[in-house]
Image (cartoon, rainbow, N blue to C red):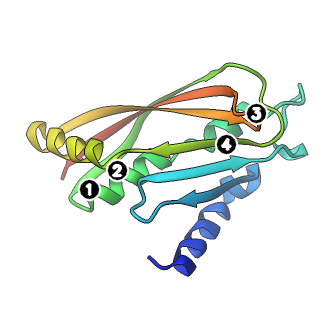
Amino acid sequence: MTEKQMRKLIRRVSLYPPYLGAGIKLKKLNQNFTRFEVEMKMHWYNRNIFGTHFGGSLYAMCDPFYVFIIMNFLGTEYIVWDKSAKIDFLKPGKGKVNAIFEILDNELIQIKKETDTSGKKTFFFTAQIKNKNNEIIATVEKEIYVRKK
């Protein structure tokens, strides 16, 4: 993928209505779509009554990326769905927050191998949402269901 195509994809994801409405932006992704970096700045429209980031917006910034990574790796012969999610709010989120979602190549190979062996399987991933001081403000656990078509 060229640099221009990469910038276009980043812009398109950032303009996705739920992301646009919450002020969530995809900042970076790598060439093989195994690592996504997302950020959200504090605005009046993503703030809760306590003056911190709205929890739904914090979760929204984490929602699709593990599915994206696995779907891109496995291709159209597999079904990949979010099965469950859990978010733990550790401290109030203020200012700009960010999260990184990554699955290593060897982990993706293992996901394919385990799914091919059993026909279907669920996998768990954890991401951290951090503030500008690199302090963890929330953790998100995602359960992803993968099945061979």
Badge 1 amino acid: Leu
Q: Mark 4 points at which residue?
A: 98
The mark nearer the N terminus, 2 or 4, is 2
Residue drawn at point x = 84 percent, y = 30 percent: 52
Q: Nearer the viewer, residue 69 or 136?
A: 136
Residue drawn at point x = 67 percent, y = 53 percent: 18
The nearer-to-camera label among 4 and 3 is 3
Q: Which of 63 and 11 is in front in this view?
A: 11
Image quadrant where residue 87 sits: top right
4 and 3 marks in contact (CB < 8 Å): no
The mark nearer the N terminus, 1 or 4, is 1
2 and 1 marks in contact (CB < 8 Å): yes
2 and 3 marks in contact (CB < 8 Å): no
Whole-number angstrom distance, CA of label 4 to CA of label 3: 11 Å
* Badge 4 element: strand
Whole-number angstrom distance, CA of label 2 to CA of label 1: 6 Å
Q: Which of 44 and 5 is in front in this view?
A: 5
Crowd rating for badge 1 (residues with CA inside 10 Å; few <14, some 14–19, many 20+): some
Badge 3 amino acid: Asn
Crowd rating for badge 2 (residues with CA inside 10 Å; few <14, some 14–19, many 20+): many
Whole-number angstrom distance, CA of label 2 to CA of label 3: 30 Å
Badge 4 amino acid: Asn
Badge 2 amino acid: Ile
2 and 4 marks in contact (CB < 8 Å): no
Q: Name the residue under label 1.
A: 74
Q: Name the residue under label 3.
A: 133
Q: Name the residue under label 2.
A: 70
